[in-house]
Amino acid sequence: MDRTVIAYVIYLVVSIALTVWVARTLSRNGRVFLADVLHGDEKLADAVNHLLVVGFYLVNLVNLGFVALYLSGDDTIEDARGVFEALSTKLGVVLLVLGVMHLGNVYVLNRIRRRGLLEREQVPPVRPQGRVAATPGA
């Protein structure tokens, strides 16, 4: 079997496994954080959690689509070193995309959480102490 094919098969298996593992880990451990961000609304936390998992899978599909387009290139891998170089480059891209997506999600959710915490800590306005008489002609 051609070394290029071996490299791409390994890449596909590892990138799919990494994406599934990251999505499941974030889904399982991020639920508590989402419930806090969303003020204890468990149904909404579950829905957002599911959407984030779907987003991770969609990003990986885009990445795999790019690889499928890239497969048509004339680059062939000559030796074992070329296999490792190709794999490290392609898996590095997958890991960077997943990491950037995770940081973006955490950033947005943390901003929502901060806003919610500020709203909880705000003191309601002072009640009026009396009435102001209306001025004639105003």
Image (cartoon, grey):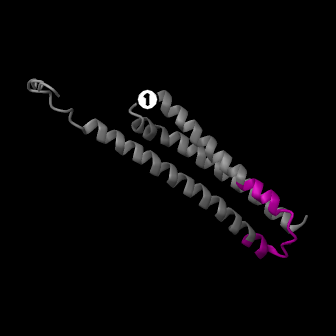
- Does residue 86 show up magenta in the picture? no
Q: Residue at x 53, y 40 (%)?
A: 28
For this orientation, the residue located farthest to the front is 137
Horizontally, is 28 left or right of 83 in the view?
A: left
Residue 10: image x %, image y %? 77, 59
Horizontally, is 109 left or right of 55 in the view?
A: left
- Does residue 71 show up magenta in the picture? yes
For this orientation, the residue located farthest to the right is 1
Q: In the rendered structure, which segment of residues is drawn in magenta?
A: 63-85
Where's the C terminus, which quadrant?
Answer: top left
Residue 100: image x %, image y %? 55, 57
Q: Amino acid at mark 1?
A: Asp
Q: Is residue 47 above or below residue 89?
A: above
Given residues 14 and 70, the one toward you in this image is 70
Where's the N terminus, which quadrant?
Answer: bottom right
Secondary structure state at the residue bearing disc 1: loop
Q: Which residue is mark 1?
A: 41
Residue 129: image x %, image y %? 8, 26
Given residues 118 and 138, the one toward you in this image is 138
Q: Quadrant of residue 88?
A: bottom right
Task: Label the magenta part by its dominant secondary structure.
Answer: helix
Given residues 35 and 132, the one toward you in this image is 132
Q: Residue at x 15, y 31 (%)?
A: 126
Residue 24: image x %, image y %? 59, 43
Given residues 29 and 129, the one toward you in this image is 129
Q: Residue at x 19, y 33 (%)?
A: 125
